[in-house]
Amino acid sequence: MFGAAKGGAAYARQASPVMTYSNSSDNMDTLNLEEISELPPMFGREHRPVAQTSVWLSTPETPDTPRSRSESKESAGPQQLLIMKFGGTSVGGGEQVLRCAGIVRQALPGRPVVVVSAMGKTTNALLSAARSAVETGEVDISAIRKMHESVIQHLGIDMPTSMNELLNELERILNGVALLKEISIQTRDRIVSFGERLSVRAFAAAFNQTKGEEEVEARPVDAWKIGMRTTSGSGSADSAFSSVEILDDMFSAIQHHLGPLKLNYAYVPIVTGYIAKDTKGVITTLGRDGSDLTATVIGAALKAAEIQIWKDVSGVQTTDPRVIPSAKPVRVLTFEEAAELSTFGSKVVHPAAVLPAWQAGVPMSVRNSMAPEDPGTRIVPKLSDSDTRERRVAAISSKNNITMIVIKSSRMLGQHGFLAHVFSVFNKFAASVDVIATSEVTVSLTLDEGYKHVDVPAIERELQEVAKVSVLHNVAMLTLIVPKSDSVSVLREAFAAFEEMKINVEMVSHGASNVNVTFVLPGDQLLKASRKLHDVFFE
C-alpha cells in the first residue's frame, strides 16, 4: 500500500496528489525578523508540542537567494552573529571543554553566541538521582559534583561560587523529594535543568581562564533571561518529545536581549540549551537533545549568519555508523531532506530543530568538535549548481520498535466520514501518526511509542466499535532520502533487494514528500535490510 508519511504530510503543498493527513493550519510562508512587531507565530497556541513541529508546520518557501555566510557578512558587515551549539559529548570533560572553548575563540571574528548542553551523561545522572530520592529516600549527588569539580580542577582554578550554589540548591530540592517520596513532572524538569546551568558556568570559566587580554569575556546566561519562554508543560525524560509550546513573543525578546551584540560585541554569551520557563516562572524542558532547538530558535530570531551544531561525529552520515561501519559522510543536505531524515530516525539533529532555521533561511552545519577542521555537513535552503551528488540516495535512516495498526471496514467503501472518525480517536488519545496508507476498505498507520507513550489498547478498543483492528508490534521503518525524480529507479532496486532477501514489506510511503521513500517492515529484518540497501545505493 502506498500512503503518506508524517514528515511528508507536513509538506503536502508541494506533494503529489496522494492522501495525506495534516493538522497544519498556521501560515508560515514568511518570516521577517527585521520587523519584530509583524512576526507571525512560529509556534501556535493550539496544543502543538515543540517536538512534533514536523507534523504541522507548513513548508517554508525557499528564499529567492540562499544566504551563505560570506554573502551575509558582505551585506550586513560585522553586525551578523554566529550561533555555535555544543552537545553533551563535546563538553564531556575538562579537556573537551577547553577544546570547544578554543573553537569558539577561533570564531570570535564571527561574533559567536554559544549554546551548550549538559556535560556528558549529566542529564541521566540527574534523573537517576531523582529516581533514587523517590524510591529509597537517599540523596547522592557526589557523581554530579565530582564531574563538574574535575572540569574546574583541570582548568587550575577554584570552583566558581555560582556552581557551588547550584549544587547546594540541587541537593536541597532532592532532599525535599526524598522526604515526600514523590516527584512532579515540574520538579523533574527543574532537577534536570541543573545540567545545562552548571555546564554554561564551567564553559564560561574555561573560556575566560584562557582568553587573551584583548578578547572579550564569556558570560554564562540562563536561557530564560534572554526570552526563552514556553507554555506550561514538560519534556520527555527519554525522548525528543515535549508537550510545551514556544511562545510567539519569544523571537522579539531574544532580539531585544542579544540584538545589541550586532552593534557592540561586548561579551560571548554562553546560553543554556534545552531549558526555558513558562509565563509563571516554572522551568520547562524541550525534550532530549532540545539544545539543538534552542540554537536554531536563537539563530532564527537573530537572523544569524549560520547555525553550527557541534557534535562528536563529522556531520551527517549516509546511515548510522555504529550499525554500518562503512557509512559515508554527507556533505550537503537541503532543509527538507534534513527535516525528513531527523523525523524518521537520524539522531544527529533534534527532529524539530531544522524548522526554525529553514523558515528564517539561516544556513546550518553539523560539525565535529573532535576534528574542527572537518567541513561536516552543510544544511541549505536548496542545492546550488556546485552541490553535485554522485548518488541518487542522500542518506538512509530508520526507526525500530514501531507499532502498526491496520483498520479494516466495509463502511469505508464509497462513504465519507469514516476517516474523520478514525482520526478523532487518535486525537482523543493525543497519538501522533508517523506513516499512513489507505485502500478501498483499509487504513494502515504507524505509531512511535518510543517517542511518546500512547495507550494503544484503548485506541484499539474504540476502533473495534466500527472496524476490524489488527495491531502489529515491533515493526520498523526504513527511510531513503531521495529526490522524487529518482524515486522510480530507487523503488525498483529497493524492491529487488527485498525480494532477494525474502523480506515482506508491510507498507510503503511515497508521494507525500519530495524527498522521502519509507518502507515499513518486520523489526527483526531491519538490520539486514539496512545493510543491503546501503550496499545497493552507496557501495
Image (spheres, grey):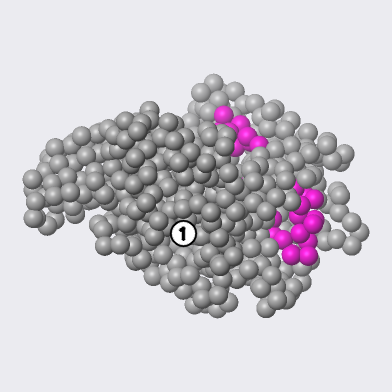
**Place of residue 141 in the rendered image (x, y in percent of width and height, measured from the top left):** 66, 29
Q: How many callouts does the rendering have?
A: 1
**Residue visible at 51% across and 60% down?**
334
The answer to whether 108 is drawn above or below residue 399 in the figure is below
Mark 1, other Cα within 10 Å: few <14 / some 14–19 / many ≥20:
many
**Residue visible at 13% across and 46% down?**
441
Reply yes or no: does residue 379 show up in magenta.
no
Q: Which residue is mark 1?
A: 336
The answer to whether 80 is drawn above or below residue 183 in the figure is below
- Please state if 190 lies on the left or on the right of 430 as rendered: right
Name the residue nearer the viewer: 487 or 17: 487
Helix, strand or loop under label 1: helix
- Please state if 59 lies on the left or on the right of 20 as rendered: right
- Please state if 319 lies on the left or on the right of 22 as rendered: right
**Place of residue 378 in the rendered image (x, y in percent of width and height, measured from the top left):** 60, 57
Name the residue nearer the viewer: 503 or 68: 503
Which residues, given as a range, are shown in magenta?
100-128
- Please state if 38 lies on the left or on the right of 507 as rendered: right
User: In this view of the protein, can residue 464 be seen by the observer?
Assistant: yes
